[in-house]
Amino acid sequence: MRTLAAALAATLLAATADAQPLTSAQPTSAGADQTEALHFAGGRVHQAIGFGNTYMVTTKAGNVIVDTSMPGPAKRHHKLLTAVSDAPVRYIILTHAHGDHTGGVPLWKGPGTKVVGQAQETEFLDYQTRLSGFFAYRNAAQYDNTAGARRNEALNPGNHAAPKLADILFEKEMTLKVGDLTFRLMSTPGETPDHLTVWVPELKAAFIGDNFYGSFPNIYTLRGTQQRKALEYVDSLNKVLALNPEIIFPSHGEPIVGADKVRAALTKYRDAILYVHDATVKGMNEGQDVFTLMKTVKLPPELYVGEGYGQVAWSVRGIYEGYAGWFDNDAATMYPVSPAEAQGELARLAGGAAPIAARAAELNAQGQNALALRLTSAALAADPKNAAALAARRDALKALLAKSGNSNESGWLNAALRQVETAKASAAP
């Protein structure tokens, strides 16, 4: 059976002007075999494929770049797109300041080039830089980068240490006129607080950044994030829908061509987000706990948009705790006693790690792998080098990985498997 990444790469490379959205987010290797740019909107918009796409819009007065991918793929993107046009780059527009959108800025920025971003970009860059050490480890784990999966506690540069990125910042809207085309920039928070959408009315085209891709969005991402507000996503998608675009260009995945297809895709996406938000709020008001809601809130079939990148259950928890914070009504939670401490005590009362590991193995055999994984956490809290607990944990992780169709989930399961192998090696005589 093909891996998820291989299937996605095949889908990407088969992109056409009538392409549909992906069923998941792109792998980090997406577009590696691309030999020439893809062309859209009557040959005015040109796409280089990557985990983050780069778009070049050609005008009679020079080019405009929308997003620049990561530093590695950016070199390939620059080569592909400058083969189409080597005219001066007038503007680089960043839909938001995640690294897979900003990595190629130095390649594209010439003497007269201006970088444009939304006004929240400065604080968002400071936030990312402030937590550089934290995110170095988390990003490496989530994206299966074993070389980078080391916590670097020296990465703590200060609260406002991010280098300046944009030359021009705007609050709600701004318009750039470049040659024969108009670029209307609108604040559309969702994926990030500094997120923007670019509307080119002459082409009926919207560059929608990360507020739409072929999966339920990462309203909460496992690597950690500031609160992403579901209702802001909804409002931002409504702004784009009001433009009646005939083509949208997401930063991850393929363009969608045709006014009816665009409207159907964005409407379904908006309604899916709103459904999950409203169901979560309803459950909160009824007194349901977050884990119950994570299990029970499901998209109806007509609103299912895939869960290859974001996942509904994680988003439910993100919405719940975004509104209410971390306290769960249990008085024990008020105190700095970790779950692992309590689990270790309970494991010792149960006779140690061995009987808990045996029960975890039984649960694995029954297909209850997530519960088995939780039990191994308790067993290992009592005895971190217990061979049977490590074996049961490895089996649970492998079973969950085999069932996973979500790239973020798979990244964290692989990271946990590496931790098990490290623990086994350190426990060996």
Image (cartoon, rainbow, N blue to C red):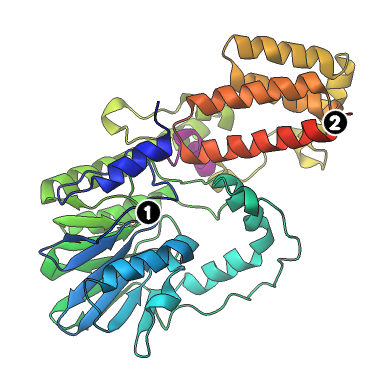
Vertical position of residue 225 compared to residue 292: above or below: below
Identify the residue position indicated by label 2 in the image: 427
Q: Which residues are magenta?
A: 307-319
Measured as percent of width and height from the top left, residue 65 is found at: 30, 72
309 magenta-colored? yes
Vertical position of residue 26 compared to residue 349: above or below: below
Residue visible at 64% across and 12% down? 363
Q: Which three-letter amino acid code belongs to the residue tagged 2?
A: Ala
Q: Nearer the viewer, residue 69 or 293?
A: 69
Q: Which three-letter amino acid code belongs to the residue tagged 1?
A: Ala
Identify the residue position indicated by label 1 in the image: 32
Residue visible at 47% across and 24% down? 296
Residue visible at 55% across and 55% down? 226
Instruction: Tell me, yes or no, whether the two marked residues, 1 and 2, touch with CB atoms within 8 Å.
Output: no
Residue visible at 76% across and 61% down? 153
Q: Please rate how many residues cluster around mark 2, counting C-alpha atoms within 10 Å: few if below 14, some from 14 to 19, many from 20.
A: few
